[in-house]
Image: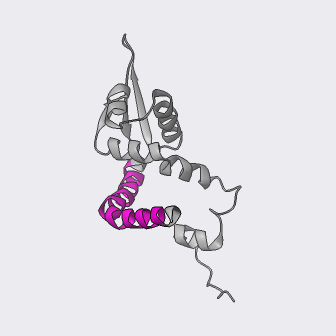
Amino acid sequence: MKKKRAPVAPALIGLSEKLRRGDLLDPGCPTRDVLKHVTSRWGVLVLIALEGETYRFSDLRRKVGGVSERMLAQTLQWLETDGFVSRRAYPVMPPHVEYRLTPLGDEVAERVRLLADWIETNFPRIAKHWEAASKKRTT
């Protein structure tokens, strides 16, 4: 049986508490879209690449290896709509557009980078599980 928790003031409710309550787990919760944008493969990499930097589209595409032009454009659009990325277009020919993180983007990028750092640091442990799973499938 689940223990009842004391009510928490709405401003003090963190993500873990919301997860316990189920808001993010609700399919109609709009925060799911933001979570999808931030934690998608390209969202994570774009946020990390833009930390402390300003890039033109083509330079950012080179920095984030393997991303298609279409996916990078879509990811930047999502992150801009969410308020994490600032897009600045200069009125010159050929077009010159630069992207950088907003203050809100700096905050989310820091958290995403912590997750990415943890994954890179612990990858040898993760790879052992991949190897064990592979051996199970072949036997």
- Which percent across, then down, holds residue 74? 52, 33
Q: Residue at x 37, y 31 (%)?
A: 61
Residue 28 quadrant: bottom right
- The answer to if 132 sits in the magenta stretch is yes
Q: Is residue 30 left or right of residue 101?
A: right
Residue 88 x/y as whole percent? 40, 28
Please report the residue visible at 70 percent of the width from the left and 57 percent of the height from the top: 27
Question: Is residue 15 within the magenta segment?
Answer: no
- First to last magenta residue range: 106-135
Does residue 123 sit above or below 33 in this rendering? below
What's the coloring here?
A: one colour
- Residue 37: x percent and y percent? 53, 46
Q: Quadrant of the N terminus?
A: bottom right
| Residue 79 in view of the camera | yes
Taking the image as shown, residue 7 lies to the left or right of residue 70, namely: right
Is 69 positioned to the left or the right of 22 in the image? left
At a point 53% along the width and 67% down the height, the residue shown is: 15
Question: Measured from the top left, where is residue 60 in percent x and y?
Answer: 35, 33
Viewer-side residue, 102 vs 139 = 139
Could you say which is closer to the camera, residue 18 or residue 119? 119
Q: Is residue 118 visible?
A: no
**Magenta stretch: helix, strand or loop mostly:** helix
How many numbered circles are shown? 0
